[in-house]
Amino acid sequence: MYPAPFHYHRADSLQGAISLLQELGDSARALAGGQTLLVWMKLRFDEPQHLVDLSRIPGLADITQDGNEVCIGALATHAEIAKSALAEALPSVRDCGSGIADAQVRSRGTIGGALGSADPSCDWPTLLHTLDATLTCIGPEGTRTMPVSELVEDIYTTTLKTAELITEIRFKLPSENSGGAYNAFKRCAPAYPTGSAAVQLSLDGELCSEIRLALGSAGLTTITSKEAEDILRGNPLTASNIDKAAETIVAAADPVPDQRGSEAFKRAVLLTLIKRAIDIAVRRCNGETIKGHHEYA
Amino acid sequence: MPEAIDKVSVQVTINGRNYRRDVEPRLLLVQLIREELGLTGTHIGCDVTYCGACTILIDGNPVKSCTMLAVQADQCEILTVEGLEQDGELHPLQKAFSENHGLQCGYCTPGMLMSSMALLAENPHPSPDEIRKGISGNLCRCTGYINIIKSIQAAAEEMAG
């Protein structure tokens, strides 16, 4: 299958890419790894007249740490992140990166592309919500930062302006008494998840001092629930508290029935995933080494 | 629809040989490999990033060549299934697939071999579970996975000496 014809432009600098995208306007798309965009173009869901290839712009794929702040370049691939020292230090990052699609897609797909596609089935946005990540965005009007929670307006729709690009993803390394986990349920490796869940929590003795919960493939955007977090924050993580919080966030989800399952099935999957993620996060908090991974049907 | 589309010059090294072509930007890498260069060992199965029949290695990394433009591969080093055999000698993976009945219809085999190459380069002694994960982006519709996993295990032993 061929995409519709388009003009190809290879950007060699960020400013060059932004100027070109501004000049070309709505007829152009920015191309990173292409693992979402090229499939859409082949299926003729999208027929841009111009592609601006960002992949040769130097310096946009670095994974660095400055004090306790982590910075991931938007063009870092899923595989690069999954195999990085960061993933070694932060198991939830490894859970997420190493389970996205399959080895081939992880070679090409980028974290910035996954965010920019605003697809609620993508894995990174769900995890990044629990890490309170901020995004650096550069466009014709300069540089700004925004919390990851403000990126997506609706399915496939971001708040990015014309010619504005995500360049970095930043978050603080969680403290010593913290643990996180990400897991997803998929019919097979290359499929998008039927549901996914991410948790980041801190323990102060028996009490849960801080918690973030998020669900992916659970509605038109990433699902979060302050109400569910409030059930656990400041309280002991008893089975009944965990059940209540899990049920609360799943009630906030709005899964769309499709070939991956009915709404009821997806809610059952999400409930299991979020409870499992909380369990793994607590055990990691207590120093256990757990190799989390995505589950297949 | 845009009118005159400029062709773009692409230079790639495939299995050690240099190729240069002027291509339409929308030409997929798998089409460059198969149709322009005649290397038909790389197969097109699903054409939507699912089945992995079109897997090749680009700079050592496994990639589905149906989901990459030829222009994106400019200046890259590519290995396809044709590059596995050396001087008439099958690669240990090819030999192991043959000896362990690791294929039935053979359609998925080029992709299976290339994903296995990437897996073994990174993890020379994979467990059966790690092999399953390593080839999880490759579908075999004859469902011959048991023998495929056996083949990869046998090749790993052979390659480790």
Image (cartoon, grey):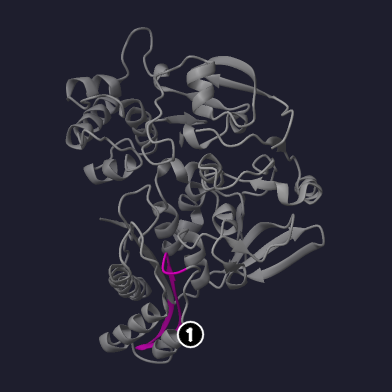
Q: Is residue A98 left or right of residue A68?
A: left
Q: Nearer the viewer, residue A258 or B146?
A: A258
Chain letter of mark 1 equals A
Foreground of the two, A198 or B144: B144
Quarter holding residue A242: bottom left
Q: x, y (%) of residue B66?
A: 48, 33
Write down the region rendered in magenta.
Answer: A201-219
Residue A34: where, in percent of width, then height? Answer: 56, 43
The image shows residue A204 at horizontal and vertical percentages of 41, 87
In percent of width and height, residue A91 lies at 41, 62
**Residue type highlighted by circle 1:** Lys
Task: Name the residue: 29% across, 28% down.
Answer: B160
Is A212 placed above or below B93 here?
Answer: below
Left or right of residue A210, residue B115 in this image: left
For residue A214: magenta? Answer: yes
The residue at the point 25 percent across, 25 percent down is B158
Residue ID at (41%, 30%): B54
Q: Quadrant of residue B45?
A: top left
Q: Quadrant of the C terminus of chain A?
A: bottom left
Q: Residues within 10 Å of mark 1 (few under 14, many from 20)?
A: few
Q: Residue furthest top?
A: B88
Q: Which residue is mark 1?
A: A226
Residue B36 visible? The answer is yes
Which secondary structure type mostly characterizes the magenta part of the structure?
strand
- Marks counted in the figure total 1
Res. A69 in view:
no
Where B9 sits versus A150, above or below? above
- Is A90 part of what is drawn in magenta? no
SS category of the residue bearing label 1: helix
